[in-house]
Image (cartoon, rainbow, N blue to C red):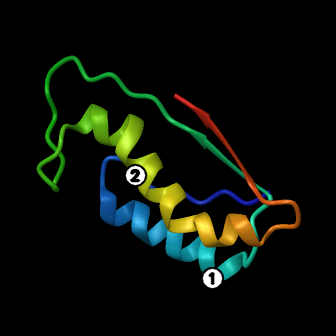
Amino acid sequence: VDIVKCDLCELNSVREAAEIVRKEHSDIMCLILNAGVMFPSRVTTSDGLDGMMTANHLGHFLLVSSLVSNLTKSEGGGGVVLLT
């Protein structure tokens, strides 16, 4: 089990985390994604996106889509577990 820290509100942070995982793990059996935020008022990310939408959905989508090739290399195909 490896833990890679990234800020799901910052898409550059997600890209950097995906790059670390791609380099360290040629095949991924399971990717577990866990995040959930609720801001009391609207927060805009440095990318100009809604912070809650980015953290809860867009960051996960970017991470998984960046690692699809590593997931499919795993024997039997890799799995994704998403908890928000």
**Residue 60: x %, y % from top left:** 47, 47
Q: Is residue 43 left or right of residue 52?
A: left
Q: For mark 2, give the secondary structure.
A: loop
Q: Amino acid at mark 1?
A: Lys
Q: Residue furthest top?
A: 40
Q: Residue furthest right?
A: 75
The residue positioned 87% from the left and 60% from the top of the image is 76
Rendered location of residue 46, percent (x, y): 16, 55
Task: Identify the residue shown where x is 16% and y is 34%.
Answer: 43
Q: Who's the residue at 29% across and 35% down the image?
A: 53
Q: Nearer the viewer, residue 64 or 9?
A: 64
Determine whether 43 is above or below 6 in the image.
above
Residue 78 place in picture, x, y as percent: 76, 57
Q: How far, Cα to Cα, is label 2 from label 1?
A: 19 Å
Q: Quadrant of the N terminus?
A: bottom right
| Above or below, comparing residue 28 to residue 22 in the picture | above
Q: Is residue 39 left or right of residue 78?
A: left
The front one of 57 and 42 is 57
Category of crowding for the residue at label 2, using alpha-carbon neighbours closer than 10 angstroms: few (below 14), some (14–19), many (at least 20): some
Taking the image as shown, residue 44 lies to the left or right of residue 26, namely left
Residue 7 image label: 2
On the image, which quarter does residue 32 sit in? Answer: top right
Secondary structure at numbered mark 1? helix
Q: Using the rendered view, name the quadrant where residue 34 is placed.
A: top right
Q: Amino acid at mark 2?
A: Asp
The residue beneath circle 1 is: 23
Is the residue 83 above or below the residue 12 in the image? Answer: above
Q: Position of residue 81 (x, y in %)?
A: 67, 39
